[in-house]
Amino acid sequence: MEVPKSHPRHISLVTRNKIVECVNKGITSIHGLIAQGRGEAFDYLIGEKTTSKAKKQIKKAAKMLVKAKHPVIFVNGNVAALVPKGLVTLSRVIPAKLEINIFHKSRKREERIKKWLIKHGAKEVLMPKKPLVKYIESNRRFCNPEGIAKADVVFVPLEDGDRCEALIKMGKKVITIDLNHLSRTAKTATITIVDNITRAMPLLIKEIEKLK
């Protein structure tokens, strides 16, 4: 679908189309469409712009990621659909490992996300292997021993609250991007950036580049 740039909802519709495209490619779960719609609703409430508070949180997140000894970036279907190049760039500038972790179990989809990230420039993408995340029973408990098991700082945008709580209990610092400031993730994370990931990611990368 071609969206005219003159359309008042141009950015929102283009973003929505990215999710739909990746559902059709088998990268994003169909449930991701619901999550995207919920995020759009909260984005309306903040005027679809990055707030001054979000910019402050982005600066804090950049400092934490740069200082981290073993930072890891977790990737789910929606994040892979919305900012694949941003994820790859972020992993390079920190530097940090990319690790796939999805809620709805599917090895085929995990493999497709991996290929999608490699297509966008990733050199290495870790896959979930063992149930090393404590305190949860969902598919998110599976992770890579070289990723989350060693991580001291975990970047988990568009996150599920149960895993965020679990990571905090495990003694790890968590950074998230979540438009819903009322979610368990937003309330639990060490640093919460209340913003649209498509706006926040370039700002986070720019801030890290300044610090580096």
Image: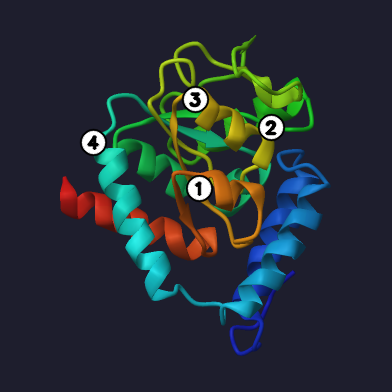
Q: Please name which of the two marks, 1 or 2, marks the residue nearer to the observer.
A: 1
Name the residue tied to disc 1: 176
Q: Please name which of the two marks, 4 or 3, marks the residue nearer to the observer.
A: 4
Q: CA distance from mark 1 to mark 2?
A: 15 Å
- Residue 30 location, x and y as percent? 83, 47
Q: Amino acid at mark 3?
A: Val
- Residue 57 location, x and y as percent? 37, 59
Indicate the quadrant where residue 152 lies.
top left
Q: Residue at x 71, y 72 (%)?
A: 41
Q: CA distance from mark 1 to mark 3?
A: 20 Å
Task: Locate the N terminus by quadrant.
Answer: bottom right
Name the residue tied to disc 2: 102
In the image, is residue 171 above or below residue 36? Answer: above
Q: Amino acid at mark 4?
A: Lys
Could you say which is closer to the camera, residue 77 or residue 211? 211
Q: Amino acid at mark 2?
A: Ile
Say which mark, if any, is on residue 125: 3
Q: What is the crowding at mark 1: few (fewer than 14 residues within 10 Å), some, or many (at least 20)?
A: many
Please state if 189 lies on the left or on the right of 106 as rendered. left
